[in-house]
């Protein structure tokens, strides 16, 4: 079961975990990304390429489901403007056993950082604002799953 | 060169594909993040180029327009592209692309 959402509103992580638990499968793993207050950051704005993003996230969820025999994979990614402490992304997986759920979840968060068309813009209290540069460490994190 | 000219006039708002009115085949080009900001528009149309034209060759043509285009395509190591909603290497041929996109390396998650 694959569930992908891209939305501006905040999501209810507990409700998403409940949906995964309701399947009655043995293991659930989840990851939640939160806006960091680094260096006086006051807001983070996420831009994306709507139709392509949805396709990319579906494809990644399908890959994870197949590779780790997941019973479910959920990806929720927010777009628009968020304040420090707000949740940006939710990845949840369920499988018969923990290793598959954990690995599938780790793969999804690594892959969506490098393979889905999202861009972050940071704004700071002193008026500065800039696009976040992609990190080589993120590419390396994704490559370890190849 | 493409559907634009030095006067900055672009045929916007038309859907990609064949337009019976003038018989031209056009493709839509989308810009995201710093590309949209530098160029000042999120989308435009260009006359379709020969199918063996690469994404990189299209970047060069756009860059030749100068202004925001020259800024956006200044450093090709920081240019990524997509053809018809799929990430594509810059040496990929455009083929019969209907929708082309340029953007910086992604930073989601």
Image (spheres, rainbow, N blue to C red):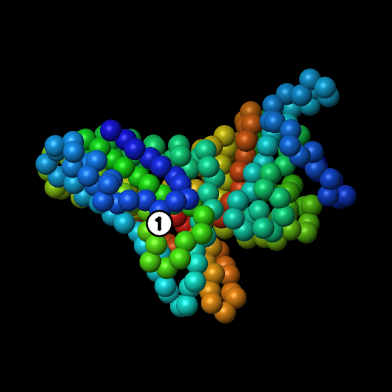
Residue A3: percent from left, percent from top? 34, 38
The residue sitting at 22% across, 44% down in the picture is: A18
In the rendered image, the residue lying farthest to the right is B7
Q: Please, is residue B88 above or below residue A45 in the view?
A: above
> Which residue is more in the foreground, A55 or A107?
A55
Can residue A75 be seen? yes
In the image: residue B42, left or right of residue B103? right
> How far across and down, in percent of the image, does residue A41 sit?
48, 73
Q: Position of residue B101 (x, y in %)?
A: 61, 43
Secondary structure category for the residue under label 1: strand
Q: Quadrant of residue A101?
A: top left
| Residue sitting at x 53%, y 63% | A121
Quarter location, residue A73: top left
Residue wearing tag 1: A88
On what subunit does the disc labeled 1 rest? A
- Please name the residue shown 41% across and 49% down the image: A77
Residue B64 vs residue A122: left or right?
right
Front residue of this view, candidates B77 and A120: A120
Residue at 60% across, 51% down:
B32
Task: List the single residue furthest toward the top.
Answer: B20
Residue A73 as seen in the image, left or right of residue A123 = left
């Amino acid at each position: 079961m694959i569930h992908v959402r891209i939305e501006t509103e905040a999501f209810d992580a507990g409700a998403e975990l409940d949906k995964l638990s309701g399947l009655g499968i043995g293991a659930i793993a989840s990851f939640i990304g939160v806006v960091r207050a680094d260096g006086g950051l006051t807001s983070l704005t996420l831009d994306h390429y709507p139709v392509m993003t949805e396709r990319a996230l579906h494809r990644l969820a399908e890959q994870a489901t197949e590779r780790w025999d997941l019973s479910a994979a959920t990806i929720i990614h927010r777009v628009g403007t968020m304040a420090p402490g707000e949740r940006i992304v939710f990845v949840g997986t369920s499988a018969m056993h923990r290793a598959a759920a954990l690995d599938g979840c780790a793969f999804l968060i690594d892959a969506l950082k490098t393979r889905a068309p999202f861009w972050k813009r940071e704004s700071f209290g002193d008026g500065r604002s800039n696009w976040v540069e992609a990190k080589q460490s993120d590419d390396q994190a994704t490559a370890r799953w190849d | 060169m493409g559907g634009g000219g030095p006067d900055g006039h672009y045929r916007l708002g038309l859907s990609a594909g064949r337009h019976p009115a003038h018989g031209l085949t056009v493709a839509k080009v989308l810009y995201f993040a710093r590309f949209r900001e530098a160029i000042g528009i999120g989308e435009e149309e260009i006359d379709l180029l020969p199918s063996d034209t690469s994404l990189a060759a299209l970047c060069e043509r756009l860059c030749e327009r100068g202004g925001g285009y020259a800024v956006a395509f200044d450093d090709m190591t920081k240019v990524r592209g997509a053809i018809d909603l799929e990430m594509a290497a810059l040496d990929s041929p455009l083929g019969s692309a209907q929708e082309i996109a340029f953007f910086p390396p992604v930073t989601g998650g």
